Amino acid sequence: MRAKSTRCPEPHDRNPPDEDEGLLEEFEDRYITTLGAKVSKKELAFDYPDRDVTIQMDMTIWDIMGEKGFRDLLKEAFFHGARGVLAVCDITRYSTLKELDDWVQSVFNVVGEIPVVYAVNKVDLKDEVMILYGDKEIDQSTRAFDAPYFYTSAKTGERVEDTFRALGNAILSRAEVA
C-alpha cells in the first residue's frame, strides 16, 4: 500500500542539518528537494498474525517546511492524494503548536478529513530550555482532529518510529485494512 503523508511544521521548526539527518537516516531511501518541499520515503511493515498477512506500506513524506506562502500557492499540489498528516511542532516554541491548526485545516480543505498524528519535537532539549507548554495545551490542540501525539526528537530518534507507526495504523484503519 502506498500512502502520501504531509509533514506540516512551522517555518522556524527547522532542525539544524545534523538533527534533520538523524531523523532522515531512520527512513530515507531518497531525499529530493522540490519547490518548497522536501520529499522522502518511509517503508513500514504491519503484521496481522490473526489473519496471517503482512501489509507493506510505502509512505511518501512531503515536508512542506512551514512556508505559508507555498501552502497557499501550491496547496493543491502538495496536499492532493494525502492519506495522513504528520503535524510537527517545536516543544520550545508554543507558536508552532498554535499554528498547526491552520496547516491541518488546509490539508482537510483539499483532501477531506484524514488521519493526523502530532509530533511534539525537540524533546531532547527539555532539560536545557524553558518549556512554555505541555500536555494540557497539546491535548487542546489535538482534540479537534482526534489526533494522538508523541514527544519526539529528530536529533536522537526518540519516538520517531512510534509516530510513523501510529500514522500508518490510522491510515490502514481508515482504509478498513487493519
Image: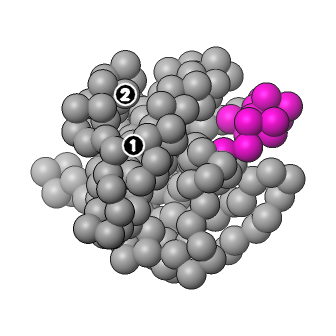
Residue 170 visible in the current orientation: yes
Report the label total: 2
Q: Which label is found at residue 50?
A: none
Please report the residue visible at 32 percent of the width from the left and 69 percent of the height from the top. 128
From the top left corner, tell me how far across and down residue 141 is, in percent. 37, 27
* In this view, 91 is above or below 28: above
Q: Is residue 78 magenta?
A: yes
Residue 175, picture quadrant: top left
Q: Is residue 93 left or right of residue 16?
A: left
Decide: marks 2, 1 in contact (CB < 8 A)?
Answer: yes
Q: For mark 2, does the 10 Å Cα neighbourhood hold few (<14), some (14 to 19), or many (20 or more) residues?
A: some
Q: For mark 1, does the 10 Å Cα neighbourhood hold few (<14), some (14 to 19), or many (20 or more) residues?
A: many
Given residues 136 and 127, the one toward you in this image is 127
Going by the numbered disc 2, the residue's amino acid type is Ser
From the top left corner, tell me how far across and down residue 6 is, in percent. 59, 44
Please report the residue visible at 35 percent of the width from the left and 63 percent of the height from the top. 129
Which residue does the numbered mark 2 point to in the structure image? 141
Given residues 177 and 130, the one toward you in this image is 130
Q: Which label is found at residue 118?
A: 1
Give the structural element (helix, strand or loop) at label 1. strand
The stretch in magenta equals 66-79
* In this view, 149 is above or below 34: above
